[in-house]
Image: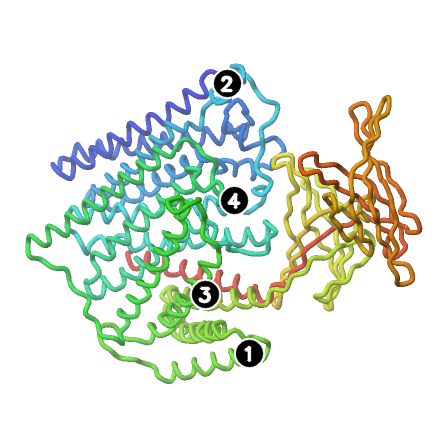
Amino acid sequence: MMHYISPIGFGLIAVAFIAAAVAATAYFLYYRDRQPALMDLANRSFVVMAISSGLALAFLVFLIMTHDFRVNYVYSYSSTILSKYLLFATLWAGQEGTFLMWTFYGAIYGFILMRTVGRERPLVLGFLVLVEAVLLLILLKKNPFAMIWHIHEEAPIGFMPRDGAGLNPLLQNGWMVIHPPTLFLGYSSTVVAFVFALSAMITRDYHGWIKAVRPWVIFNVLVLGTGIILGGYWAYTTLGWGGYWGWDPVENASLVPWLFSLALLHGILIQNKRKALVRTNLFLAGGAFLTMVWGSFLTRSGVLTDFSVHSFAPSGLSFYLIMFQVLFTGLFFFLFFRMLYQQYRAGEAFTAFDGGVLNRETFILAGMLILILTGLMVLLGTSAPLYTPLFGEAASLSPDFYNTLITPIGIAMLIVIAIAPLLAWKTSELRNIPTIMGSAGAAAVLTAVAVVLGLRNFMSIVLVFLSAFVVFINGKVAFLFIKRNLPAAGGYLAHIGVGFMVIGIITSSLYDRSEKVMLPQGKFAPTGLGYEIQFVDFVNEPDGRDRVKLVVKTPGGTYEAYPRFFYSDYTNGYMVSPDVRVAFARDIYISPISYTPAELSNLQRVELGKGETGAVGDLKITFHDFEVQMGAASQKVAARLTVQVMENGYPRDIEVQPTLVASQGQMHGEEVEIPGTPYRIKIGRVNATTKKVELHITMPSQDGDTPRNMLAVEVSEKPLISILWFGCLVFMLGGALTLVNRIKQRR
């Protein structure tokens, strides 16, 4: 079968591409001519495309699960030591696999649309299949079935490596099985609203498309939002840096389309009620998809390799990704401005938004504008590596830029989602004044408690008050809906989730306490956080991803922690994964930093140039010069040092000359004692370029014990971070109920 693997896989993609091209053409012709034969041809071609892409995906999975390392993709991302779940997850570890998944998701959307709106809206399917055709064209360029000798010229034809390169250790986690496919599902679903918008601008069905697309937008907001949340939790529990969102460019690339989709979802509410925001909603549908494509370019082209830990390496796809962006951006804006021109020529006008100040649609519009502004600002910051070279070196914006930006935006958004549920549609009327007063009073009490417990930052006090206000207001409204129709409460529950999330973000970030601690093996070491920690030993794991056993004494009891800490040949460095002790009041977060064997545990290093003085413990060491001693079979380089020690409170200078011996191509330092002290000193290395010497000083054990293995860890407390994760769960529940409610209404 060896000679047929690549042709079979490539052939399936080629068949899918041809079928997609035929289907797109037939759908467009059917829209023009309305001949049933064209619709039949389009649907059959679509089925061929979907089956072919599905078979290609299944074939790649088969090659992965059977360890056929002759296939370059299988070799590059998998290995025999991976579990079956992680082995399957390598399907989306590389670019080729993710493009194939993207195509497969699009085929699923197409099947659903074919059964629901196919004959009424052929342009929707036509544009969807056009997107599929472009993705398949990229797969023809970036063939997931290329053999290893096609990519690596040094590999002979038929070569089968004994094992694959494996999966990055950071990705060898259960979240790898869940997070990426969820995120890609959310990414890809932005296409549905986009193709509906393209169709609407051609057919001039400016209101009908909104009703058809609303469940899809809810689905997109729910799934993409869930993917973002899962990614944050994965980072928090696995990567060891203690955070969940770092404003990384690739993180932002998923956030921007989600913000546009969320704005579109709320714009649909206004258009349904007032027949307004037609152009805005069309623009948002286009914006969500086009920013997703732009994010794919940033992620996959390699332009962010130096700025993001998530981005793919350069792949040679930049041209195709740019063409993808240009094609659909050009198509969208051509149709958008064509629509505006047609309206102008015909003297027609869309319904203007002319609501009063205190009605629900005005506040929803304000929320939409906040979301759009946030999305545009994040998009600008994310794209910084592309335009900053115009002003100097390429650079990305620091997290401080986004954190400064997000605080006033967060305050404005919380005000909107607190007040909007109490306003009437169309008329300026503030209802339920007692509810407002009661909720404000409860929020004030909660905020006062937070201040008593130590909350001092003014902006944080404002955010806590508004977040609590959001929770109480929306909680009251949600309770009324739950008694009558649970799914109808979904939107209010989502807003409650946002309130909890903001409170959790504030408490866990402002009052995060962290400390670096040295742990001698077998002994408890105190921390400034009130814990005692003992480094017991390393625990070997069958997969080589070893753990460290720690015993942690807290005021509430004793427990064992097992953070991962191991050397990876894949990255040629140590890999860390923290231990997180989850509790409502606080998480205890322990992440290893470094390990020092006993023979080096009392070792200090100092690098000195001629005439320089360095301090090590209570010693002051001055380096004067080198002395070279030539022998018959060896060469010695001595460092002339003056070591100042303290005796009875007075300094005393001691002259010492440690030497570095070069013999038979080997170099080693000869250790000498510093007279009258327990210290020993030797030359570690000599830097021939800078003329500096690195000295190694062995220190006495502080407690008189023999030297011990030492583990450095960072211990952190994350107060009330559980509120953040609870808010995320409530948000996802609210989104799911909203989707269920919309599906029920359509039936």
Residue 80 is situated, as x and y percent measured from the top left of the image, at 61, 30
Q: Amino acid at mark 1?
A: Val
Residue closer to the observer: 637 or 540: 637
User: To which residue does mark 4 refer?
Assistant: 309
For the residues labelled 3 and 1, the Cα–Cα distance comes to: 22 Å
Crowding at mark 3 (Cα within 10 Å: few <14, some 14-19, many 20+): many
User: To which residue does mark 1 refer?
Assistant: 451
Q: Amino acid at mark 3?
A: Gly
The residue at the point 62 percent across, 65 percent down is 586
For the residues labelled 2 and 4, the Cα–Cα distance comes to: 29 Å
Circle nearer the N terminus (1, 4): 4
Q: Are marks 3 and 1 in contact (CB under 8 Å)?
A: no
For the residues labelled 4 and 3, the Cα–Cα distance comes to: 29 Å
For the residues labelled 3 and 2, the Cα–Cα distance comes to: 54 Å
Q: Amino acid at mark 4?
A: Val
Residue closer to the observer: 404 or 183: 404
For the residues labelled 1 and 2, the Cα–Cα distance comes to: 66 Å
The residue at the point 33 percent across, 72 percent down is 420
User: To which residue does mark 3 refer?
Assistant: 497
Circle nearer the N terminus (3, 2): 2
Circle nearer the N terminus (2, 4): 2
Circle nearer the N terminus (1, 2): 2
Residue 16 is situated, as x and y percent measured from the top left of the image, at 33, 29
SS class of the residue under badge 3?
helix
Tell me if 739 is positioned left or right of 82 in this view. Answer: left
Per the rendering, the mark at residue 153 is 2
SS class of the residue under badge 1?
helix
Residue 632 is situated, as x and y percent measured from the top left of the image, at 86, 21
Q: For the residues carrying marks 3 and 2, which lies nearer the camera in this image? A: 2
Q: For the residues carrying marks 3 and 1, which lies nearer the camera in this image? A: 1
